Amino acid sequence: MSTVRTLVRETPAINMGDGIIAVLRNDRVARWTSRLVLLALWQVAGLLSQRFPTPVETVEILVREFQTPFDRGEWSAANNELVQNLWISIQRTGIAVFLVILIGLPIGYLMGRWWRVQAYFTDLVTVLLAMPAYMWALLAVMWFGFGMRAPVFTAVVSAVPGLIVHVLQGSLAIPRDLRDMSDAFDVPGATRLRHLALPSMSGAIIAGIRLSIIAAWGCVVLVEWFGSNEGAGFRARDWYQSAANYNGLMAWGIVVLVVVIIFDRGIIERIDRAVHKWRGAVGDFGAAKVAVNDSTQEG
Amino acid sequence: MASPSVPETSGSERVGTRVDVARQARIARWKAVAYSVFGAVSFLVAWQIASGFTRTEFDLLPGPLEVLQRMGEYTFGNEAERIASGWVFLNFWETFRKTLYGFAGALVLGVPIGILMGRYRYAKNFFFDFVYLAANVPLIVYAILGLLIFGIGDTGPAFVVGLLVLPVITLNVAAGVEGVDQRLLAMSRSFGLSSRTALRHIVVPSLSPFLFAGSRASFAASWKLAALAETFGGTTGVGVQIRKAFQGFSVTDMLAWMMFFVIFVLIVERIILMRLERWVFRYRLKRGEDILRF
């Protein structure tokens, strides 16, 4: 899970009396040092390479994208190449995620509840997990052509199995004796859901949904790369193929990455913290390690 | 394939002789297998039916048998279409080689960084964003990066696979190093063990399960990325074949390569790596406990 923030939280305050070495060793300073080093490395790589752009060139082309009106229309802060293409991709991702949750959540829960359902879907989920998202993307482009259907289809097919596995694990974690007890005492379904199923599954569900959103985003951009006439992925490909402009390619790659980080750091972490307040911080490598191992990385 | 869970037996059934219990467990397992075979068959039938409905002049969704025949041609060769026998193995080997290079690079770089991160607070803070970033980059951005830095060629795929695997190795090693039993270390010191012996008998055993699990988990992803990067800018390997299938608008070829892909990943991940892991760590497995389900 993305509780990585907890690492920074207990940072001791910087005390200027500590001397320069102590200040440099401070946790927060260390993190910023690493970010600066990364930026410097990027700059050096940009200067050395023929194709690889420097940070400044990347920002420049993004500003240019922002100043170009979308599809030869009237320019406004909302109607330009940067915002419109991004918005199209985000909309597609949103629709896909809605469908993913609609399909994956019930199947995952039922698989944990009844062994027959689990046995029935096991082979399918195993095979789907091993299929690469980008082959689905190519197939979807051949089947559906340009438009909305190809990206949504690809995202659904690639993200659903991951969500199912997460929800299944959560569903298996529902304590069996509590389930048996609610059977014995005739606890109504709604109460059972509210007080038994959801609390034991919430962690797995949030982790699963986080992963499916990131996967869906990757898939949508992939499909747009291979076959679309709008969206973030299309724009990256357009710069690369029709203009041989590597700066534009890099810039859109960065935009795609930034969306993931903003979403993960800004939204999911907050939700996760709010839902699991009672659990206290699960800091350190345990949580981060799970997050990394977890990235089945579709798309 | 993942073993489906054994049906639960209710409390009253559990009473009985040992023979009964064993027999019931066996029946239950057979029932689970039957259901999962039924599941697989029903999806194949659904595929066949769907392919019957979408016949156009382009053959949009060929049936399972057609794809199987194509897979046979790729494996045993086809004179008429000039497909060499063993074509599939040749391509998979090329991609596998690049994946291995990437893995090796990630190990060489990731293990020292992981040890530093587990040992020093400063290193942990310093490398954390690198690791976080590398773990969250979408595969397409990696593919773009490989294309940007190395252009058309075979270095790009290997390089980006290394980038993808690096955070997994690093964080797992860091967690392993941090989880080393400090009391054991203190004891080894007071008994005058050399640090090399302590490393070999305390640190490495507590670290390797993490490392192994991480590597196995990232195998499928790294393999997918290698193929994707090849499709973007490779000259050999599975990804190139997939690109050709796409450019030739051949759904049959695409599905055939996809099935090969699935078979390969499942064989390596579920059979080879899982067996290996179970064998290496057999001393720490409880009876009946399995390492992985999905």
Image (tube, coloured by chain):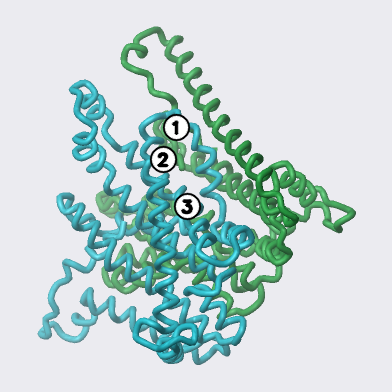
Chain colours: A cyan, B green
Horizontal and vertical percent for residue B103? 54, 62
Q: Nearer the viewer, mark 1 or mark 3?
A: 1
Residue A257 against residue B3 in the figure, above or below: below
Q: Nearer the viewer, mark 3 or mark 2?
A: 2
Judge left or right: residue A128 versus residue B57: left
| Residue A282 in which image quadrant | bottom left
Question: What amino acid is labelled 3 in the image?
Answer: Ala
Question: What amino acid is labelled 1 in the image?
Answer: Val
Q: CA distance from mark 2 to mark 1?
A: 8 Å
Q: Residues within 10 Å of mark 2 (few under 14, many from 20)?
A: many
Q: Which mark is residue A117?
A: 1
Q: Going by the picture, which residue comes out furthest to the front?
A: A74
Q: Are marks 2 and 1 on the same chain?
A: yes
**Chain letter of disc 1?**
A
Q: Residue at x 21, y 27 (%)?
A: A182
Residue with the mark numbered 3: B217
Q: Earlier in the sequence, mark 2 or mark 1?
A: 2
Q: Which element is circle 3 on?
A: helix
Q: Residue at x 36, y 87 (%)?
A: A76
* Contact check, label 2 and label 1, Cβ < 8 Å: yes
Residue A30 against residue A276 in the figure, above or below: below
Judge left or right: residue A256 versus residue A3: right
* Contact check, label 3 and label 2, Cβ < 8 Å: no
Horizontal and vertical percent for residue B68? 73, 44
Q: Are marks 3 and 2 on the same chain?
A: no
Q: Residues within 10 Å of mark 3 (few under 14, many from 20)?
A: many
| Residue A273 in which image quadrant | bottom left
Question: What amino acid is labelled 2 in the image?
Answer: Ile
Q: CA distance from mark 1 to mark 3?
A: 25 Å
